[in-house]
Amino acid sequence: MPAAGVAEGLPALFLEFGLLLLGLGILARIAHVLSISPVPLYLVAGLFFGEGGVVGIPASDSFVSTIAELGVVLLLLLLGLEYSGTELVRTAQRQARTGVADLVLNALPGVVLALILGWGWIGALALGGVTYISSSGIVSQVMRDLRWRRNPETAPVVSVLVIEDLVMAPYLPILTVVLTGTGLVSGLISVGTALAVVAVVIVIAVKGSMRFHRLLSPRDPVGLLLIVFGAAIAAAGLAGLVDFSPAVAAFLVGLLLTGEVAEVARRRLDPLRDVLAAVFFAYFGIVVDPGALPAVLLPAAILAIITIATKFLTGWIAARTVRGTTIGALRAGALLSARGEFSVVIAGLVAVSLVLPPEFQAFVAAYVLITASAGPLLARFVEPLGWWWQQRPPRAGRTLEV
C-alpha cells in the first residue's frame, strides 16, 4: 500500500485499537473486582469487537493479528523463564506416565468424534490435536491471576504443559504434511528439524546456559529486556520459517535463562505481557464468526464437557505424583481444562488447506471459546470447594488434608 494510503488509514486503526484496549482495560478492572481471571471476559470482548460484532475489527487486520501473535510468544517466553533446563528434564522424566495418560485421555475423544462426524482420518488427526493440547498461555495467565505459581501442584501441571508443547513440535509439521500433501522426504525433513531444535536447546539449557548469562547483566535491565525479548521474537520468526512452532521456540529461549537474569527479565516483561496477552485472548473472539457458532454449538459443548472431565483426570494423576491433596488435584484439572493458542493454530492450518469442510473451523472456534472460558472460571471456583473440604469435620480415622 502506498505511504499516503497507510497514513490515511492510521486514524481509523488507532481508533479501533484504542477502543479495543480501553474495553479490555475496563473488563480487567471488572475481573479484578470480582476476583476472577479476565480471560473469559477478553474472549467475549473479541466477539463484540470482531467482524460480526459492533465495532467490526476485521479478522484479517495484520496489525491486531501481529500483536496477538506477539502476545502468545511473550506468554510462552515467560513460562520458559520460570524453569531451568535441568528442572525441565527432571520433571518431564517424573511426569512421563502422566504425559502418556494425558495424550490418550484427551486426544481420543476428538479422534472418535471426528470419525463420527464423517471427517475421516485427517479430521481425526486434526481434532485429536485440538482436544489434546491445553493452552499454556491461559494456564500461565490464570496461575498468575490466582497466585498459584508456588502451589505444590503447579510444577506437575507445568511439566504436563511442557510435554504437550514438545509433542506439538513434531505434530504440527506432520499435520502440515498431511494437509498439504507434501512429499515424504520434505515431511521427514520438517519433523527432523523440529526434533533437532528441541534437543539442541535442551542440551544447551542443561549443560551450557551459564555461557549465555555472561552476555547478559541484570544490572542493565533495559539492555536485558531488549536482548531477551528480541531473541524470543527472532527465534519465533526463525521457527516459523522452518515449520516449527513459534510458541515452543519462545519457550525454549526462556528456558536458556535462569537465576537473577531470568528474574529481572520476568519483572521487566510482566507489564508488556499483560497488555499483549489481553489482545491475544481477545483475538480469539475476533476471528470467530458469531453466525457460524449456533450450528456447531451443541456437539462442541458435548465434546468440551467430556474433555474437561478428562483433563481433570489428567490433573488428578499429575497432582498425585507429588502427593498432592484433593483440592490440589482439582486445581490442576481446572488449569489444564482450557484449550487455546495451539488449537487455534491447528484450525488455521486446516482452513488454509481446504481439506476439511468449513464447519471444522467453526467447530474448533466454539470448542475453544467454551473451554477457554470454562477453564479460568473452574479454577476460580475450586477454591471455595477446597475451603469446604478442609473445614468439614473429620470422621473417625480420617485427618484433614492440608
Image: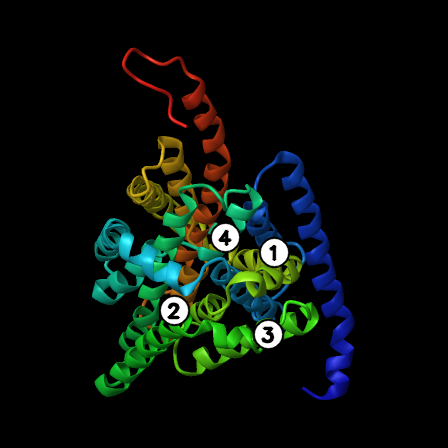
Residue on which disc 1 sits: 278
Task: Residue at 34% x, 65% y: name it.
Answer: 166
Residue on which disc 2 sits: 206
Numbered disc 3: secondary structure: loop
Front position among marks 3 and 4: 3
Q: Mark 3 to mark 4: distance in Å?
A: 25 Å
Q: Mark 2 to mark 3: distance in Å?
A: 18 Å
Numbered disc 4: secondary structure: helix
Residues tagged 3 and 4 counted as in contact (Cβ below 8 A): no
Lower position in the chain sequence, tag 4 or tag 2: 4
Residue 228 is drawn in which quadrant?
Answer: bottom right
Lower position in the chain sequence, tag 4 or tag 1: 4
Lower position in the chain sequence, tag 2 or tag 3: 2
Q: Amino acid at mark 2?
A: Val
Lower position in the chain sequence, tag 3 or tag 4: 4
The coloring applied to the image is rainbow
In the picture shown, does residue 200 fall above or below 263? Answer: below
Answer left or right for 146 relative to 91. Answer: right
Task: Residue at 48% x, 71% y: name it.
Answer: 253
Residue on which disc 4 sits: 140
**Circle 4 Cα neighbour tier, 10 Å, few/some/many (<14 / 14–19 / ≥20):** many
Give the number of callouts.
Answer: 4
Nearer the observer, 134 or 371 = 134
Residue 242 is drawn in which quadrant?
Answer: bottom left
Residue on which disc 3 sits: 216
Numbered disc 2: secondary structure: helix
Lower position in the chain sequence, tag 2 or tag 1: 2
Where in the figure is residue 386, as x and y percent of width and height? 44, 28
**Circle 1 Cα neighbour tier, 10 Å, few/some/many (<14 / 14–19 / ≥20):** many
